[in-house]
Image (tube, rainbow, N blue to C red):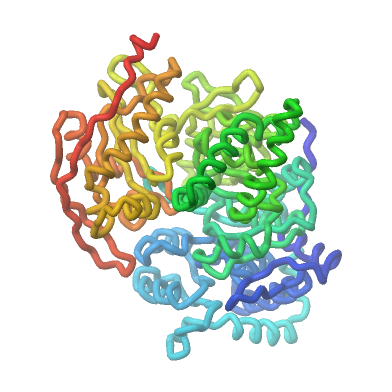
Amino acid sequence: MAHAVVKETFPSLLLKHAKERPTQAAMREKDLGIWQTFTWGDVAEQVKLVANTFLDLGVQKGEHIGIVGENRPRLYMAMMAAQSVGAIPVPMYQDAIAQEMVHVLKDADLRIVVVENQEQVDKMLEVRVDVPTLECVIYDDPRGLRNYQEGMILSYDKVLERGERFAKNYPDAFMNALTAVQPEDAAAMFYTSGTTGKPKGVVLTHAALIDRAQVIERMEKLTHKEEVLAYLPPAWIGQNMFSYAQALTTGFTVNHPESPSTVSIDMHDIGPTYYFSPPRVLEELLTQVTIRMEDAGKFKQWLFKKSMNLAKRVGTKILDKESVGLLDRIKYMIGDFVMYAPLRNALGMSRVRVAYTAGEAIGPDLFTFYRSIGINLKQLYGSTETSVFVCVQKDGHVYPDSVGAPVEGVEIRIADNGEVQVKSPGLFKEYYRNPESTAESFTEDGWYHTGDAGFIDHHGDLKIIDRAKDVGRLVDGRLFAPKYVENKLKFFPYIKEAVAFGANKEFVTAFINIDLEAVANWAERRGLAYAGYTDLASKPEVYQLIGDCIDQVNVDVAQDEQLQGLQIHRFLILHKELDPDDDELTRTRKVRRNFIAEKYKVLIDALFEGKPSQYIETEVKYEDGRKGKISADLKIAPAKVVNTAKAA
């Protein structure tokens, strides 16, 4: 497959947009309820000043610069400035506690870190004893920092002033540094989520990231007129690709919400045309819709149910331009007027032309729901090491159980053990300072090990079953793919998280985390009093509610001959929510399966030994770093299992 060679770098693309569309909005930020606009001309000007300060601070080509915070235009500009002088931005998760950041700060030898606000400044001051390389912390938001006397902290405004002074003395320094940056140079370093061990620094080049962005630009016919909302952690490659790499490649506008809590309001303000979301966000949005419908009157509930049944039957066919009977088409048009269009509007997705989901497998029911109401939601498959885009579903070829065909430039093969292996121009350069892991990531003939188990179906699309290391067998040899059954459970609005166990066992069991908002709403309507999460999770009525959800999943998986063994026999509802601060989830909210299996071994044993309950005491970490303990006597409940032999 012929493939264009990338000649641009991110800083050269920035200057190109500033020249071609200087007055177009490059970024907007909502501050105190008002949207502030930065044009491409403004951005290029600010980036120049920050880059000059970096040069003044002695930043060398190849040096790493840390970036910590929510999505903020100034943090994005700091990344552009770093790249303009040949430095490598290293975005870090803003919700990580200070001690968690030490590994990245030390591993990347960070001397300069650009942060959002006082919270992040405090974290840097807390760990500077452990990080001797740390010299300078630049902050964006000055609130609460007026009386800080530390010599190492510097306000963003001061950085701009210093950049101006440096530019007067060395007018050519910026362009000299920028033109020395080559497409094959490292453009950014992202730390993996670390589900199995210490996070590794994934080094990606300008060429790899820009190449993948250009491929999708062509495939989806993206233009500089797209509107995007940047609301996921910038340290996650998915967010970075959509609101940074693709924005600089295509030249569209990126909107930064006021805060994580205002995202849904800001979605309505902006009306994004190009949207990206991990399944958990789509689950949360659907949960809110479900809660609102439960509070609605009888007629509205009847109308919603009727409309959704119709949408499920014909909505996806209409979206895929398949033939649908005239009567159904008319009914759907009426349904669109009274239900689907208002629903899309309530979700802030009225203008969405292309929406992607990735990061985790999405439940088929959840996926179909969005497509059936007219949202062009598609799945994609990739990872940090592949610059995101490996497979993407093409319009008219969208199936709930696959992740699409390989995109331009990508080759895929399935190894004998079922592992998906990849060749792509978007592959990473290396794991930073980790030649052993880099070498282990590739086969002898140069294919990248994804670590995922899958197969190519009759449509030529890739189907992912699970992480290769998580796929196992029950004692009787039947397939055990935990992620598959967990995703089915998480479609229910009352279940926030699920962890299934069963490898080398006689049957499958599960831990459940209830969704506090949805279950609390359900309990209040039934006059059920409770005192917090632990109390609510232990109620017999809640066990009955979750048991009904599990029974439905069991009926569903029993229909599939290959997956019949995945029926859940026994379950318990955990006394606490799984939390990244307690190392049970990664910062991108992926389950750390091995850690959970070790931490809650006593509960897993009780599930398989047939005990009716089990006492447990668990240590928890609070946001301020303090530790506490939560204890409970957890009830263990049986689930209804479909007799598959009888069914057959």
Mark count: 0
**From what the image shows, is residue 327 above or below residue 250?**
above
Would residue 619 appear left or right of 351 to someone viewing this image? left
Q: Is residue 410 visible?
A: no
Q: Residue furthest front?
A: 299
* Image position, residue 577 (x, y; %): 32, 52
Residue nearer the viewer, 369 or 104: 369
Residue in the picture at 63% in, 70% down: 73
* Image position, residue 175 (x, y; %): 77, 70
The image quadrant of residue 231 is bottom right
Residue in the picture at 38% in, 19% down: 564
Q: Quarter of the image for the C terminus: give it.
A: top left
* Image position, residue 53 (x, y; %): 63, 78
Residue in the picture at 28% in, 61% down: 621
Q: Quarter of the image for the N terminus: give it.
A: top right
**From what the image shows, is residue 261 above or below residue 358?**
below
Would residue 555 appear left or right of 308 to someone viewing this image? left
The image quadrant of residue 387 is top right
* Image position, residue 472 (x, y; %): 36, 25
Q: Is residue 361 visible?
A: yes
**From what the image shows, is residue 630 above or below residue 474?**
below
Residue nearer the viewer, 89 or 326: 326
Residue nearer the viewer, 542 or 124: 542
Residue in the picture at 79% in, 57% down: 224
Would residue 193 appear left or right of 447 to someone viewing this image? left
